[in-house]
Amino acid sequence: MVQGKDLDPAAIEVTLTVRLIAMPQSHAVISCLHANLAALEAVLADIDQQGIATITCLGDLVGYGPQPNEVVDLVRQRAIPTCQGCWDEDIIEGLNACDCSYPSQLAERRGHLAHQWTAEQLSEESKAFLASLPMSLRRDRLLFVHGSPNSQHEYLLPDMDAFAALERVESAGAETLFCGHTHRPYVRELREGSIRVRQMSGEPAGVAEAEDRELRLPLRRIINAGSVGEPRHGNTNPTYVIHDEDIGAVEIRELPYEVERTCSAIVDAGLPPIFAWRLRHGFEYAERADDASHVCER
Amino acid sequence: MSQTLLISGPPGCGKTTWILSQLRSHPGPCGYLCLAGTPDEGLSQARDGGIDLTWLQDQRSGLQDLADPDQALAPRPANLLALIELSQFQPPTEPGLAGMDRRVIPQLEALHLSPDAHLHFGRDAVLPRQDTLDFSSLQAWERNLAGAVWDPASLSSFWFELVNGAYGDAYRAWWCRARISIPPPSRSPSPSA
Amino acid sequence: MARWALISGLRGDLEAYEAIQADLRHTRRVDTLFVLGDVIGPERECDALRLSQGEAAVDALLQAVDPGHMGWLAALQFGFIELDCALLHGSSAAVDDSLGPNSSPLLLLDRLTRMDVNRLFTARSGRQFRLELTGGGIDSQVRDLESQRHQQQSVPQRQVIGIGAGVRYTLYDPGSDRLDFLSAGSKPQQRPRGFA
Ligand SMILES: [Zn+2]
Ligand SMILES: [Zn+2]
């Protein structure tokens, strides 16, 4: 066992160098910050501590939480590449989510209330930043979106139809799809897929011939980063993921933060106290419909 | 042989639960009465609203309502088990029947009920050990939602929050006179002449 | 037994429409006619269709085609769901989604899944085809904070059917699943290409 006092400065330098070389391909993906500054600060500190330099954000910087401008400022200051979330879109373009994405009128009222409050609080500069965010980000065969490649409002739930899930990744030309929006982190691997079809054509005129073919489906992955600011996985801890591109490993990180700091900020901001209660107990602010296939047509 | 028992204890100590267990194990006819209790040392009483009787009648078929004045005058069956529930914060000062709150006696007499025994939670060992929250004050909160439209999903969200303490500690809560109206089916357009 | 006629892509071609009507009247027992879009088109006189108002099988459809018929077209439904069949111009994803015999089976399966139907009838490509999913499966592994779940899903027995366009139309019997690809007018006695 080497005692700390026995290490000379040169040895420390060597250790650091090795670490930097060994981990260049690890990158962190965060999503759904929802104006929760304390949670974002805790997650960024955790990422920094591991020496990870590349961070990608999947949107929903604002919505429900009490510090929308502060969170936008921190993301800009850290120059984190970010795509646009459903809340970021709605704040810019007016409420876009349809009523059917809320399972109750109470949830809808709360959603609208939070929307109105956030729209009033956001500075023009923050709004301009949110408006400038792209729908998706791509790095080689990695694709980063908020909901799904089709829409910021579509949920890719962990147990949605496996072929439909694979189709989302395939149609977008990606190998690994990073998404958020469900506020529950997961890693899904779709492998050894095949579809056999029998094709009969009515053309040209004459007796139709049946033709059999088989499509072999490639291995694809969907990685959901969970939520920093509004966890929905059962407790109050923010979640995010670390992906190692070289070996394909994914770590779902979960860590505590000062939830009471955000709860006080909710009350101080004049947001409904029930938001603080729900956050403190690990419930989302307003329930969302769990329909994976639902895409807002508006 | 019929028996009439007065069961008292602070709110939430488990009176109704214990009463149900007695009603279930009694093979003969059963009756139940919930006394309103008396305002005590500034402690406000939550109104019962008849919910305990309704619930017990649902759990034990044929349960007689002892508050029914018509039944009070009719001869009681021989092996009737009559259980009377009373909310009472303070423990009785005297043992047995002597410790009964004098103020409930006129109510009992009007209904021709005279308890054979008085059991108080926390005093009488025959009752389960009480596991009661220490209430210094008890508030009854009531909100009339007449005319307000609540969809069932919203109600269940609100209920979930309420019973989990989002609006303060709740020891008992219930919906009263909830009615869900289903809108009439939309009329199909009348056939054109 | 119910039999459906499925037509599309008339693009204002009154002759094609009348040829199909004649065909249906003379030879086929059809109780429901579905028109899967593209009633009007730039090539022909669109208003011609209005003249045929009163034709038995499309009465209900055409009664609404009054001077305000543009409003009627705009208000047309996205598609029909009948029994376990979706009848659409394009697909469940978009009205201009063109599904053909060479479309990726993964895409076709997704479109069927989105509507949760066993048969999807589409018109956009103008082709007549039947693509039957006959087998296959996929392995899915999900890991979250609580657990790791493994699931094997197999390909459901579902079909996508292209109904054709113009004079080429399709008859379908949902009871027996029999499908006939037809062409109206040109050869009245042409033997239909049917699959049961
Ligand atoms: Zn979100
Ligand atoms: Zn979202």
Image (cartoon, coloured by chain):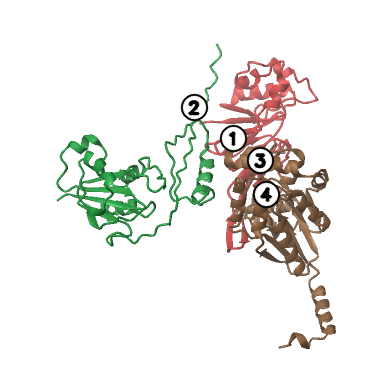
Chain colours: A brown, B green, C red
The answer as to whether callout 3 falls within 8 Å of ligand 1 is: no
Residue position for label 1: C81
- Residue that lies at the very extreme toward the top in this rendered image: B193
| Amino acid carrying mark 2 in the image | Pro
The residue type indicated by label 4 comes to Asp
Q: Label 3, on which residue?
A: A113
Image location (x, y in percent) of residue C21: 65, 22
Q: CA distance from mark 2 to mark 1?
A: 25 Å
**Front of the two marks 1 and 4:** 4
Three-letter amino acid code of the residue under disc 3: Leu
Say whether residue B38 is left or right of residue A232: left
Gap between marks 4 and 3, in whole Å? 16 Å
Distance between mark 1 and mark 4 Cα atoms: 51 Å
Alpha-carbon neighbours of circle 3 within 10 Å: few (<14), some, or many (≥20)? some
Q: Residues within 10 Å of mark 2 (few under 14, many from 20)?
A: few
Residue named by callout 2: B184
Q: Position of residue A33 (x, y in %)?
A: 71, 54
Q: Say which of A240 and B139 sits in front.
A: B139
> Which residue is more in the foreground, A95 or B46?
B46
Q: Chain of mark 2?
A: B
Q: Do marks 2 and 1 both belong to one polypeptide chain?
A: no
Foreground mark, 1 or 3, reads 3
